[in-house]
Amino acid sequence: MKLLFESLSLLEWIIFSLISNVFLYLLSIGFYLFIDKTCSKNKIQITDHPFLKSDLYVSFLTLFLNIVVMLIGVYLWKSGWITLNESKTILTLLIEIIAITLVMDLFMYIFHCLVHHPFIYKILHRKHHEHKSTNFLSLFVLHPFETLGFGLMMISVFMLYDFSIFSITIYLFINLIWGTIGHLNREFFPKWMEQLFLGTTKFHNQHHLNEQRNFGFYTSIWDRIFGTYKA
């Protein structure tokens, strides 16, 4: 796989990034709508956030910036700043995926706390929190600097170690699905999973209702440690 990617031209990389990010964008929306239509659980909040054309346009901008972020990652890989390794055991892959997820969870917790500073919040994060309840676009309704900030944090983590391309790919898939689940308006997880310190749907929904609590993304670990957790 690594040899295949190394042979791609710039134009082919642009096309690949476009196709893969559009696929992930549509996968998130499709997964959200599938769960919303088939899940028997009651909605967490009575109604979903209404569909707005302005949100759709913002989501398209987020999609475009995700394409750019992938191309930045490719450039850094081609330049030797990111090293990929594909000769890993299943155990090593699992450890790498957990490591990436926990480190990114900490970085995202810190970043999330920063964008809730009153001055920064008004500029960057207020648009996302217009979604007190959520809908299928909520995950993508972000200020451009937030999208780029998350993407560059992710790339910086990939620069720290020669992760397997499979670990990175699986992590990116987990990130998309977890973000989609976090913005559902129906609880996806059984209640006992909250005891595993996971960032469940209700965990993140609580953040949309109480902006000073539950800043974590994949887990509630950092909120519990730093005293911002709300059950």
Image (cartoon, rainbow, N blue to C red):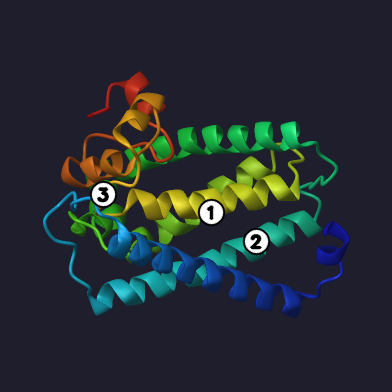
Secondary structure found at label 1: helix
The three-letter code of the residue at mark 1 reads: Gly
The three-letter code of the residue at mark 3 reads: Tyr
The mark found on residue 72 in the picture is 2
The three-letter code of the residue at mark 2 reads: Ile
Q: Are marks 1 and 2 in contact (CB under 8 Å)?
A: yes
Residues 151 and 192: in front is: 192
Q: Whole-percent x and y of residue 191?
A: 29, 33
The span from disc 1 to disc 3 (Cα, nearest Å) is: 19 Å
The span from disc 1 to disc 2 (Cα, nearest Å) is: 9 Å
Q: Is residue 67 visible?
A: yes
Which residue ends up furthest to the left in the rendered image? 46
Secondary structure found at label 2: helix
Residue pointed to by mark 1: 151
Q: In the rendered structure, which disc, 1 or 2, sits on the residue that comes first in sequence?
A: 2
Q: Are marks 3 and 2 in contact (CB under 8 Å)?
A: no
Q: Whole-percent x and y of residue 74?
A: 71, 61
Residue at x 62%, y 44% (from the top left corner):
156
- 196 over 37 or under it: above or below: above
- Would you identify the image quadrant in which residue 221 lies? top left
Residue at x 22%, y 41% (from the top left corner):
206
Q: Residues within 10 Å of mark 3 (few under 14, many from 20)?
A: some
Q: Nearer the viewer, mark 1 or mark 3?
A: 1
- Would you identify the image quadrant in which residue 227 lies? top left
Residue pointed to by mark 3: 121
Q: Is residue 195 left or right of residue 161?
A: left
The quarter of the rendered structure image containing the C terminus is: top left
Q: Whole-percent x and y of residue 199?
A: 37, 37
Secondary structure found at label 3: helix
Q: Residues within 10 Å of mark 1 (few under 14, many from 20)?
A: some
The quarter of the rendered structure image containing the N terminus is: bottom right
